[in-house]
Amino acid sequence: MSTDNPNKPAFFSPRAHLIFWLIVAGGIVADLWSKSAIFNWLKSQPFETYTVIDGLFDLVIRENTGAAWGIAAGKTTMLISFSVIAVLFVSVIYFMERQHHVLVQVALAMFTSGILGNLYDRLFNGGKVRDFLDFYIGEHHWPAFNLADSMLCIAVGLLLLSSFPAKPQTQNRECE
Protein backbone atom coordinates (compact mmCIF):
# COMPACT_ATOMS: atom_id res chain seq x y z
CA MET A 1 0.00 0.00 0.00
CA SER A 2 1.46 3.39 -1.01
CA THR A 3 2.08 6.06 1.63
CA ASP A 4 1.05 8.72 -0.90
CA ASN A 5 -2.60 7.57 -1.00
CA PRO A 6 -4.71 10.70 -0.30
CA ASN A 7 -7.52 8.53 1.13
CA LYS A 8 -5.24 6.97 3.69
CA PRO A 9 -5.56 8.58 7.16
CA ALA A 10 -2.50 10.48 8.41
CA PHE A 11 -1.97 8.12 11.35
CA PHE A 12 -0.72 5.48 8.89
CA SER A 13 2.07 7.73 7.63
CA PRO A 14 5.38 7.25 9.46
CA ARG A 15 6.64 10.55 8.03
CA ALA A 16 3.61 12.45 9.37
CA HIS A 17 4.10 10.87 12.79
CA LEU A 18 7.81 11.66 12.80
CA ILE A 19 7.21 15.33 11.99
CA PHE A 20 4.32 15.66 14.43
CA TRP A 21 5.77 13.86 17.45
CA LEU A 22 9.29 15.31 17.16
CA ILE A 23 7.86 18.83 17.13
CA VAL A 24 5.45 18.07 19.99
CA ALA A 25 8.17 16.55 22.17
CA GLY A 26 10.77 19.17 21.25
CA GLY A 27 8.30 22.00 21.81
CA ILE A 28 7.22 20.77 25.23
CA VAL A 29 10.82 20.17 26.35
CA ALA A 30 11.94 23.60 25.08
CA ASP A 31 9.01 25.35 26.76
CA LEU A 32 9.31 23.65 30.14
CA TRP A 33 13.11 23.81 30.19
CA SER A 34 13.15 27.52 29.27
CA LYS A 35 10.57 28.37 31.95
CA SER A 36 12.51 26.48 34.60
CA ALA A 37 15.95 27.76 33.55
CA ILE A 38 14.93 31.41 33.18
CA PHE A 39 12.90 31.48 36.40
CA ASN A 40 15.69 29.84 38.42
CA TRP A 41 18.33 32.17 36.96
CA LEU A 42 16.25 35.34 37.32
CA LYS A 43 15.65 34.67 41.01
CA SER A 44 19.33 35.56 41.52
CA GLN A 45 19.08 38.80 39.48
CA PRO A 46 18.28 42.23 40.93
CA PHE A 47 14.52 42.83 40.73
CA GLU A 48 14.19 39.38 39.11
CA THR A 49 14.70 41.06 35.73
CA TYR A 50 17.43 40.98 33.11
CA THR A 51 17.63 43.51 30.30
CA VAL A 52 18.48 41.87 26.98
CA ILE A 53 17.94 44.91 24.73
CA ASP A 54 17.60 48.15 26.65
CA GLY A 55 14.30 49.86 25.90
CA LEU A 56 12.90 46.85 24.01
CA PHE A 57 13.28 43.41 25.60
CA ASP A 58 13.70 42.06 29.14
CA LEU A 59 13.57 38.64 30.72
CA VAL A 60 11.18 38.80 33.68
CA ILE A 61 9.36 36.60 36.15
CA ARG A 62 5.61 36.75 35.64
CA GLU A 63 2.91 34.29 36.57
CA ASN A 64 -0.45 34.52 34.86
CA THR A 65 -3.60 32.95 36.31
CA GLY A 66 -5.52 33.73 33.14
CA ALA A 67 -5.23 33.12 29.42
CA ALA A 68 -3.85 35.65 26.93
CA TRP A 69 -3.81 39.18 28.36
CA GLY A 70 -5.12 37.82 31.67
CA ILE A 71 -8.50 36.82 30.22
CA ALA A 72 -10.41 34.54 32.63
CA ALA A 73 -7.88 35.22 35.41
CA GLY A 74 -8.37 32.89 38.35
CA LYS A 75 -10.67 30.52 36.45
CA THR A 76 -8.16 27.66 36.64
CA THR A 77 -10.63 24.78 36.30
CA MET A 78 -12.22 26.35 33.23
CA LEU A 79 -8.81 27.04 31.63
CA ILE A 80 -7.60 23.49 32.33
CA SER A 81 -10.82 22.09 30.85
CA PHE A 82 -10.49 24.30 27.80
CA SER A 83 -6.87 23.16 27.32
CA VAL A 84 -7.82 19.48 27.53
CA ILE A 85 -10.64 20.00 25.03
CA ALA A 86 -8.29 21.93 22.73
CA VAL A 87 -5.67 19.14 22.78
CA LEU A 88 -8.38 16.57 22.04
CA PHE A 89 -9.71 18.72 19.19
CA VAL A 90 -6.25 19.19 17.63
CA SER A 91 -5.58 15.46 18.02
CA VAL A 92 -8.82 14.56 16.26
CA ILE A 93 -7.94 16.91 13.40
CA TYR A 94 -4.45 15.42 13.15
CA PHE A 95 -5.52 11.77 13.29
CA MET A 96 -8.67 12.02 11.18
CA GLU A 97 -7.49 14.34 8.41
CA ARG A 98 -6.92 12.35 5.22
CA GLN A 99 -3.95 14.32 3.90
CA HIS A 100 -1.73 16.83 5.65
CA HIS A 101 0.31 19.54 4.06
CA VAL A 102 3.62 19.84 5.94
CA LEU A 103 2.65 23.33 7.18
CA VAL A 104 -0.54 21.90 8.69
CA GLN A 105 1.38 19.06 10.36
CA VAL A 106 3.83 21.53 11.87
CA ALA A 107 1.03 23.88 12.94
CA LEU A 108 -0.94 21.09 14.64
CA ALA A 109 2.21 19.90 16.43
CA MET A 110 3.00 23.45 17.59
CA PHE A 111 -0.58 23.88 18.83
CA THR A 112 -0.25 20.64 20.77
CA SER A 113 3.12 21.67 22.26
CA GLY A 114 1.89 25.13 23.22
CA ILE A 115 -1.30 23.89 24.79
CA LEU A 116 0.46 21.11 26.73
CA GLY A 117 3.30 23.39 27.90
CA ASN A 118 0.88 25.87 29.45
CA LEU A 119 -1.42 23.07 30.69
CA TYR A 120 1.53 21.57 32.57
CA ASP A 121 2.04 24.91 34.33
CA ARG A 122 -1.64 25.21 35.26
CA LEU A 123 -1.64 21.68 36.68
CA PHE A 124 1.69 21.82 38.55
CA ASN A 125 2.23 25.52 39.29
CA GLY A 126 -0.84 26.39 41.31
CA GLY A 127 -2.93 27.30 38.26
CA LYS A 128 -0.39 29.87 37.07
CA VAL A 129 1.44 29.93 33.74
CA ARG A 130 5.07 31.08 33.88
CA ASP A 131 5.86 33.92 31.46
CA PHE A 132 9.27 35.52 31.00
CA LEU A 133 9.55 37.29 27.64
CA ASP A 134 8.78 41.00 28.03
CA PHE A 135 8.82 43.24 24.95
CA TYR A 136 8.20 46.95 25.36
CA ILE A 137 8.84 50.44 24.05
CA GLY A 138 9.22 53.00 26.77
CA GLU A 139 6.48 52.35 29.30
CA HIS A 140 4.29 50.44 26.82
CA HIS A 141 4.66 46.70 27.47
CA TRP A 142 3.28 43.82 25.46
CA PRO A 143 1.98 41.25 27.98
CA ALA A 144 4.79 38.90 29.03
CA PHE A 145 4.68 35.51 27.35
CA ASN A 146 6.62 32.24 27.00
CA LEU A 147 7.68 29.74 24.33
CA ALA A 148 4.36 27.87 24.52
CA ASP A 149 2.53 31.12 23.70
CA SER A 150 4.95 31.72 20.83
CA MET A 151 4.28 28.25 19.44
CA LEU A 152 0.54 28.89 19.56
CA CYS A 153 0.92 32.15 17.62
CA ILE A 154 3.27 30.58 15.07
CA ALA A 155 0.77 27.72 14.61
CA VAL A 156 -1.98 30.22 13.78
CA GLY A 157 0.32 31.90 11.26
CA LEU A 158 1.20 28.57 9.64
CA LEU A 159 -2.46 27.62 9.35
CA LEU A 160 -3.19 30.97 7.72
CA LEU A 161 -0.32 30.42 5.28
CA SER A 162 -1.51 26.92 4.46
CA SER A 163 -5.01 28.20 3.71
CA PHE A 164 -3.83 30.21 0.71
CA PRO A 165 -4.34 28.29 -2.51
CA ALA A 166 -1.20 27.03 -4.20
CA LYS A 167 -0.19 29.09 -7.19
CA PRO A 168 -0.80 27.01 -10.31
CA GLN A 169 2.32 26.12 -12.26
CA THR A 170 2.23 27.62 -15.74
CA GLN A 171 4.71 27.12 -18.50
CA ASN A 172 6.31 30.23 -19.87
CA ARG A 173 7.13 29.39 -23.46
CA GLU A 174 8.74 32.77 -24.08
CA CYS A 175 11.75 31.77 -21.97
CA GLU A 176 12.41 28.51 -23.85
Image: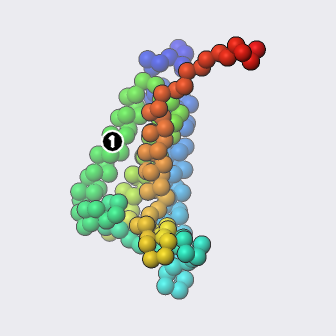
Question: Residue drawn at (44%, 57%), measured in percent from left and top?
Answer: 149
Q: Residue furthest bottom?
A: 46
Q: Is residue 144 above or below residue 107?
A: below
Total labels: the figure holds 1
Check disc 1: other Cα within 10 Å, few if <14, some if 14-19, many if 20+.
few
- Where does the image place residue 50, in percent across and percent down from the top left? 55, 77
- Where does the image place residue 94, in percent across and percent down from the top left? 41, 34
Question: Residue drawn at (65%, 15%), measured in percent from left and top?
Answer: 171
- Where does the image place residue 42, in percent across and percent down from the top left? 53, 77
For the residue pair 9 and 47, the one nearer the viewer reads as 47
For the residue pair 26 and 152, the one nearer the viewer reads as 152
4 to the left or right of 139: right
The three-letter amino acid code for the residue at tag 1 is Leu
Q: Is residue 34 above or below residue 5?
A: below
Question: Residue drawn at (36%, 56%), measured in percent from left and top?
Answer: 119
- According to the picture, the residue beneath numbered tag 1 turns out to be 88
Q: Residue furthest right?
A: 176
Q: Residue furthest front?
A: 174
Per the image, label 1 sits on a secondary structure element best described as: helix
Question: Residue drawn at (49%, 68%), measured in percent from left and top?
Answer: 135
Q: Is residue 123 visible?
A: no
- Where does the image place residue 32, in percent across and percent down from the top left? 48, 61
For the residue pair 91 and 105, the one nearer the viewer reads as 105
Q: Is residue 34 visible?
A: yes
* Quarter of the rendering containing residue 139: bottom left
Image quarter of the C terminus: top right
